[in-house]
Image (tube, helix red, strand yellow):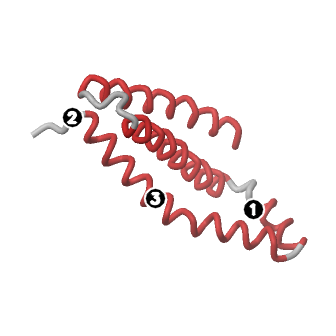
Amino acid sequence: MRLPITAWASITHRASGVFLFVGMAVLLWALDASLASPESFAALQESLDNPLLKLVIWALMSGLIYHSLAGVKHLVMDFGIGETMAGGILGVRIVVALSAVLILLAGIWIW
């Protein structure tokens, strides 16, 4: 059985939500490090030059971008717009295309 693109979008929206929930640990660690003392803030700034940490931050931003756009699509559908199969497919294509552009821009901004 082949899942339609709308089902894949729903599954990835849920998965990105779980990813963001788990990734909040990294963001809370960074917040704690930035507020603990001036020395820990300086150490955090220095560690943000690490390519691995930049990749983690970019992955979290990517998940947030996709999850947010897919969430907005769901809200639009709650207003009765795009509830048909054709409308759902168009909405998913818009979300995926816009997500790809914004994720690429986020990667350029981080690096």
Q: Mark 1 to mark 2: distance in Å?
A: 42 Å
**Residue drawn at x 39%, y 48% as measured from the top left:** 13
Q: Name the residue under label 1.
A: 47
Which quarter of the figure is the N terminus placed in?
top left
Q: Nearer the viewer, mark 1 or mark 2?
A: 2
Say whether disc 1 or disc 2 marks the residue closer to the N-terminus. 2
Of circles 3 and 2, the one toward us is 2
State the residue at coordinates (37%, 36%).
77
Seen from the viewer's position, the closer of residues 18 and 42 is 18
Q: Is mark 1 on a helix, strand or loop?
A: helix
Q: Which of marks 1 and 3 is in front?
A: 3
Q: How many labels does the image show?
A: 3
What residue would you read off at disc 3?
Answer: 19
Indicate the quadrant where residue 40 lies: bottom right
Q: Which mark is residue 4?
A: 2
Comparing 18 with 51, the one in front is: 18
- Given the image, on which type of amino acid does mark 2 rest? Pro
Side of 3 where 80 appears, left or right: right
Q: What element carries label 2?
A: loop
The percent coordinates of residue 65 (x first, y second) are 54, 43
The tag on residue 1 is none
* Sequence-first tag of 1 and 3: 3
**Label 1–label 2 contact, CB within 8 A:** no
Q: Inspect the image, locate mark 1, and give the three-letter code of the amino acid beneath it.
A: Ser
Image-quadrant location for residue 26: bottom right
Quadrant of the image for the C terminus?
top right
Q: What element carries label 3?
A: helix
Q: Are marks 3 and 2 in contact (CB under 8 Å)?
A: no
Choose the circle earlier in sequence order: 3 or 2.
2
Residue lying farthest to the front in this orientation? 79
> What's the amino acid at mark 3?
Phe
